[in-house]
């Protein structure tokens, strides 16, 4: 895809250049490479032809970039490979070249993405329940339901005031957008569940379309666009984050990233001279840049990190401009307008709605200021005859000065920035905070498959293409390398990296296919006719399929593996529904029905049981110490008045006196010399025994008489989830022969004494839940 408006567009705007173009073309036809001294035009006209992209440098010599297109333009025909062939359109502002065959293949590629994200539908839709994947989605589900409960309609933005600071300074745009969409369909809890379940899939599809457009615009090769979308479909780190039901905040970031990158490419490749600025394309792109940047910043508190590539693109473009002796102001004017618009939108929303901190919302303003400084510096360097190397040194110096001013002139803001930076480099046991190549992470192969190995050489090649004055590759490379660096620090950025990694994987794949002679060669100069045949013959299709399997098979295997890891397990869902039924039967309300579990599933349980899924902080603080406690009374004191249910799952604990072993392995029953438990009634056990749920109850007290100082045992068979579980407790009669023992389960108990006498007694369920007594006659 060409980074210039094309010969026809230039000559249409600048007819006075026609004679100069004809003279240069005549020399180009006679010589394979020439210098300025070989052509009969002045330096001003020559500079215009270079700036317009009609003439390009080839080593120490020059050549006409696309002779056929220039001849067609001089003859008054539309050129073969200009921007009119990009296939993008916004009304009449951008030319739209519709190709039914290419569109059909894109739809097929998107269908692959769709299937790879939605095959888990049976795990999300379970009866009347919509079971979102993961833990954090239930936080957003809770808050969107709260907004919907307080909103009169979709235009009642005042309802957003119920959002806590953790969300207004975290992911406010995501919550507001999903609430608004849900409100268009009534805003009920089931509707909110549907919207949350499907929004990641929509994000994946929108990202796929933006990726295709970006790849085709940059490379002028629809095959690379299609291959990119297919690789995106099978990047596990992106697939599980955009899978049906995984309504985490990351999926909301991906379309904003794609929009910003695409808009940057369009802006930089259509604003090539002053005449091009009179066209609407670069200014439409500027709007896209502004909306994309504001969206990124308002969508996530770490959004400023996702804006870093924009700054790198601007810096790189000004260096290219100085190196090619052209005006940076002209080339970057739409980009400057775009980042300025982003600054106005982001800080305006912050001022009106209080979204994000001033530091986060002000990031686009800082980017705008930096853009102004960089462009002005580039213009000064051009005016004084400076080189790109000298400009780079000045830019680095200005960057250091700016950092020092920030450090010592804005100490409060610096402290906030420093804390956020510490957060980026922290690793606190949460999997997504590990580095991509950390031994404690999932493993980069499991997150990226072989796509990384395929893409990295192409990413290096992309830098070389960018250095040869191709703005599209500058944008793609900047995003790929910056996001790769962030992913190396924390794997949470793998999803953001994935589309750009897929683009370079698509480039490498098509190049490899041409190298093994099953596809036509790859051109990256913008000369390719987008109407190239996209459907190869049968033999080539089979070869391409085998080649794709070679690079994509690991990803295909890992997509279901990674997706299954975030699905709510059957045991978790079964425990939640069992607890919900028990709480409803006994009329328990929050916090009486609070569920204590491992923090990674705590929001799931509490959403289904009591609807309070805002935080897992209490569970994270309490659950571990509770299970590790060896004194049942102390354990009971830890949760008294705060917990109604406890869920246990498989962990490695061997100490028999711990609460974990007593509950999970023995259901609270006597185990040898280890006493049984009095206050934990088993409610549920999964088929594989991995999940068990207990109601925290006062217990029913059995009292009676026996021989003084004798041992008394009470035992019953308890039915749990269609299983019969033995439950026993023991006590010792006092010197008067009186004994009492509290049991957690209703049922018929056999009371046995040392003397061998046996008596049966029934403990009603209500007695267990009310804390009553029953007496052995």
Image (cartoon, rainbow, N blue to C red):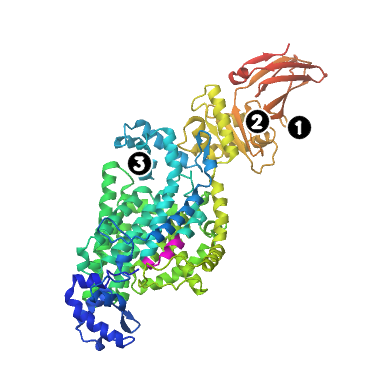
Q: Which mark is residue 176?
A: 3
In percent of the image, x 35 and y 57: which residue is there? Answer: 307
Quick check: can you spot residue 513? yes
Task: Please name the residue that numbered disc 2 is placed on.
Answer: 721
Secondary structure category for the residue under label 1: loop
Secondary structure category for the residue under label 3: helix
Q: Which mark is residue 387?
A: none
Q: Select label 2 or label 1 by which is in front.
A: 2
Q: Of the two numbered discs 3 and 2 on the same chain, state the one appearing first in sequence.
A: 3
Q: Of the two numbered discs 2 and 1 on the same chain, state the one appearing first in sequence.
A: 1
**Whether label 2 touches label 1, CB < 8 Å:** no
Image quarter where the C terminus lies is top right
Q: What is the chief secondary structure element of the magenta stretch?
A: helix
The residues colored magenta run 218-228
Residue 349, position in %: x, y?
28, 45
Name the residue furthest right.
755
Task: Please name the residue that numbered disc 1 is placed on.
Answer: 672
Circle 3 Cα neighbour tier, 10 Å, few/some/many (<14 / 14–19 / ≥20) = many
- Front-lying residue, 71 or 165: 71
Disc 3 to disc 2, C-alpha distance: 41 Å
In the image, is 396 to the left or to the right of 571?
A: left
Q: Of the two numbered discs 3 and 1 on the same chain, state the one appearing first in sequence.
A: 3
Secondary structure category for the residue under label 2: loop
Quick check: can you spot residue 442? no
Q: On screen, 656 above or below 589?
A: below
Q: Select label 3 or label 1 by which is in front.
A: 3
In the image, is 497 to the left or to the right of 49?
A: right
In percent of the image, x 25 and y 69: which residue is there? Answer: 272
In the image, is 488 to the left or to the right of 81?
A: right
């Amino acid at each position: 895809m060409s980074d210039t408006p094309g010969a026809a567009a230039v000559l249409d705007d600048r007819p006075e250049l026609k004679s100069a173009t004809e003279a240069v073309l005549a020399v180009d036809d006679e010589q394979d490479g020439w210098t300025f001294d070989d052509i009969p035009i002045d330096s001003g006209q020559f500079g215009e032809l270079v700036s317009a992209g009609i003439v390009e440098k080839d080593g120490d010599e020059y050549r006409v970039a696309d002779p056929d297109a220039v001849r067609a333009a001089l003859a008054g025909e539309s050129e073969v490979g200009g921007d009119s062939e990009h296939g993008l359109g916004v009304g009449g502002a951008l030319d739209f070249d519709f190709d039914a065959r290419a569109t059909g293949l894109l739809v097929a590629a998107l269908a692959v993405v769709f299937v790879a994200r939605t095959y888990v539908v049976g795990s999300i839709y379970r009866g009347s329940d919509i079971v979102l994947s993961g833990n954090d989605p239930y936080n957003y589900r809770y808050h969107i339901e709260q907004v919907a409960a307080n909103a009169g309609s979709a235009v009642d933005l005042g309802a957003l005031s119920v959002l806590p600071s953790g969300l207004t300074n975290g992911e406010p745009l995501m919550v507001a957008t999903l609430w608004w969409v849900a409100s268009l369909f009534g805003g009920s809890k089931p509707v909110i569940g549907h919207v949350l379940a499907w929004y990641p899939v929509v994000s994946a599809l929108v990202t796929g379309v933006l990726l295709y457009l970006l790849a085709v615009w940059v490379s002028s090769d629809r095959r690379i666009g299609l291959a990119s979308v297919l690789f995106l479909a099978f990047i596990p780190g992106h697939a599980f984050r955009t899978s049906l039901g995984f309504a985490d905040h990351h999926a909301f970031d991906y379309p904003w990233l794609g929009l910003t990158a695409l808009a940057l490419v369009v802006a930089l490749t259509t604003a090539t001279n002053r005449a091009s600025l009179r066209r609407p394309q670069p200014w439409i792109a500027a709007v896209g840049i502004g909306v994309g940047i504001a969206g990124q910043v308002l969508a996530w508190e770490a959004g400023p990190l996702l804006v870093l590539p924009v700054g790198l693109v601007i810096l790189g473009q000004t260096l290219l401009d100085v190196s090619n002796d052209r005006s940076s102001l002209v080339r970057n004017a739409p980009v400057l307008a775009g980042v300025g618009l982003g600054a106005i939108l982001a800080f305006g929303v912050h001022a009106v709605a209080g979204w994000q901190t001033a530091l986060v919302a002000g990031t686009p303003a800082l980017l705008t200021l930096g853009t102004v400084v960089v462009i002005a510096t580039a213009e000064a360097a051009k005016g004084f005859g400076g080189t790109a190397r000298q400009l780079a040194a000045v830019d680095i110096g200005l960057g250091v000065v700016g950092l020092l001013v920030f450090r010592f002139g804005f100490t409060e803001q610096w402290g906030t920035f420093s804390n956020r930076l510490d957060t980026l480099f922290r690793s606190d046991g949460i999997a997504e905070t590990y580095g991509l190549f950390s031994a404690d992470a999932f493993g980069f192969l499991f997150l990226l498959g072989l796509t990384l190995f395929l893409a990295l050489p192409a990413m290096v090649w992309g830098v070389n293409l960018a250095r040869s004055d191709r703005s599209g590759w500058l944008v793609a490379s900047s995003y790929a390398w910056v996001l790769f660096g962030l992913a190396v620090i924390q794997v949470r950025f793998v999803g953001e990296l994935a589309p750009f990694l897929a683009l370079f994987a698509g480039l490498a794949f098509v190049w490899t296919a041409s190298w093994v002679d099953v596809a036509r060669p790859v051109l990256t100069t913008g000369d390719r006719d987008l109407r190239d045949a996209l459907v190869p013959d049968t033999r080539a299709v089979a070869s391409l399929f085998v080649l794709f399997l070679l690079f994509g098979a690991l990803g295909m295997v890992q997509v279901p593996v990674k997706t299954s890891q975030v699905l709510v397990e059957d045991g978790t869902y079964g425990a939640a529904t069992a607890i919900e039924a028990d709480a409803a039967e006994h009329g328990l309300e929050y916090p009486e029905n609070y569920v204590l579990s491992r923090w990674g599933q705590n929001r799931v349980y509490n959403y289904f049981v009591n609807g309070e899924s805002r935080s897992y902080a209490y569970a994270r603080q309490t659950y571990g110490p509770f299970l590790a406690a060896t004194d049942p009374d102390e354990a009971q004191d830890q949760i008294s008045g705060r917990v109604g249910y406890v869920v246990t799952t498989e962990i490695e604990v061997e100490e028999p006196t711990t609460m974990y072993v007593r509950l999970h392995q023995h259901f609270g029953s006597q185990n040898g010399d280890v006493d049984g438990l009095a206050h934990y009634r088993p409610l549920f056990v999964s088929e594989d025994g991995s999940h068990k749920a207990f109601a925290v109850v006062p217990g029913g007290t059995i009292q009676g008489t026996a021989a003084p100082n004798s041992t008394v045992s009470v035992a019953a068979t308890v039915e749990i989830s269609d299983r019969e579980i033995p439950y026993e407790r023991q006590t010792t009669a006092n010197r008067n022969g009186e004994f009492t023992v509290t049991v957690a389960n209703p049922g018929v108990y056999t009371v046995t004494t040392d003397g061998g006498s046996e008596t049966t007694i029934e403990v009603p369920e209500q007695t267990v839940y009310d804390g009553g007594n029953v007496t052995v006659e």
